[in-house]
Image (cartoon, grey):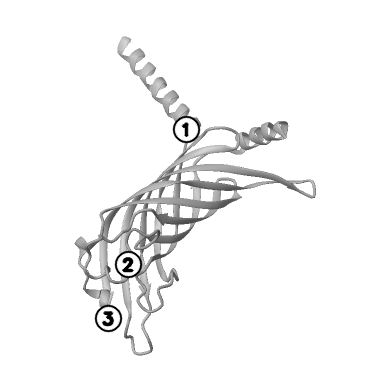
Amino acid sequence: MKLNSKRLFLSFLLLYSINSFSQVFKPGIIIGLSATDVDGSDTRDNDNDFNKAGFTGGGSLNIKLSDKNSLQFEILYTQKGSLQKGDSTGNGYYKLNLNYVEVPLIFKHNIVFNIKKKRIDNFYLEAGPSFGRLVQVHQEGTSAYGGMYVNDFKNNEFAINLGIGCRIINNLSADIRYCNSITPVVTQNSNNFSSSFFWYTFNKGNNLGWCFTLRYVFSKNNEEKKLNEKNIDSDN
């Protein structure tokens, strides 16, 4: 009898803990596409054209700080790199795949405004740092950069993220985010990139990219949304 009571108490405690966790932390999933470039890797016109397309996706954990602000922890797998298109004969073609496991820490701020007395509260701004770990490198092509080795690349990436998003329906939102690494992704003693990368100059050899994602949060937020609207209206 005592054993059953103890099991019942532990089961109740576990359910209470899970419920409390779900009220504070909102888990979610992220899936989308990336358009990236490595600054200085285009040997023909040295522009940043974001021709390299890739996949990004993973999970998130959001914690509410206030009615308008929240903090979001993410774990993402993102395909980055660079693509230089060749000429009509294929000469000059070069593709660089840099795949990362990233851990962004994002501050989110909900935007609330009125248009013709109609309340608009679907949009949010976001910003924060991220740490990335390089897990895979692949290169192909006919340009001078086709002979680079894996150890020419730095294993770690530190970046800054800026973005804007819009809630589509209930827990589903769409997001566009710009990411710029603050450290070069190519080692400074690389024989291949030293001639075209200007080291110790901002954004030379850095990862640059846009990510377009869909995000779904597992949360019963209908009643919470109404409460937030009421609180925000009272503030205004």
* On screen, residue 85 above or below 19: below
Residue 220 visible within the image: no
Tell me what residue is drawn at x 41 percent, y 61 percent.
Answer: 208
Q: Are marks 2 and 1 in contact (CB under 8 Å)?
A: no
Q: Kindly report which numbered mark, 2 or 1, lies closer to the viewer in this rendering.
A: 2
Residue 95 visible within the image: yes
Q: Amino acid at mark 3?
A: Thr
Instruction: Give how far across and how far down residue 158 sits, in percent.
Output: 35, 50
Tell me what residue is drawn at x 41 percent, y 77 percent.
Answer: 45
Q: Secondary structure at mark 1?
A: helix
Q: Which residue is mark 1?
A: 22
Among numbered discs 2 and 1, the one appearing first in the sequence:
1
Q: Badge 3: few (under 14), some or many (20 or more) residues near its Cα, within 10 Å?
A: some
* On screen, residue 50 above or below 219: below
Residue 93 sits in quarter: bottom left
- Nearer the observer, 29 or 36: 36
Q: Which residue is mark 3?
A: 142
Q: Amino acid at mark 1?
A: Ser
* On screen, residue 180 above or below 21: below
Q: Amino acid at mark 2?
A: Phe
Q: Badge 1: few (under 14), some or many (20 or more) residues near its Cα, within 10 Å?
A: some
Q: Secondary structure at mark 3?
A: loop
Instruction: Give how far across and how far down residue 220 sits, in percent.
Output: 55, 37
Residue 162 placement, left or right of 53: right
Q: Kindly report which numbered mark, 3 or 2, lies closer to the viewer in this rendering.
A: 2
Q: Which residue is mark 2?
A: 197
Residue 4 sits in quarter: top left
Gap between marks 3 and 1 measured at Cα: 52 Å
Gap between marks 3 and 2 measured at Cα: 19 Å
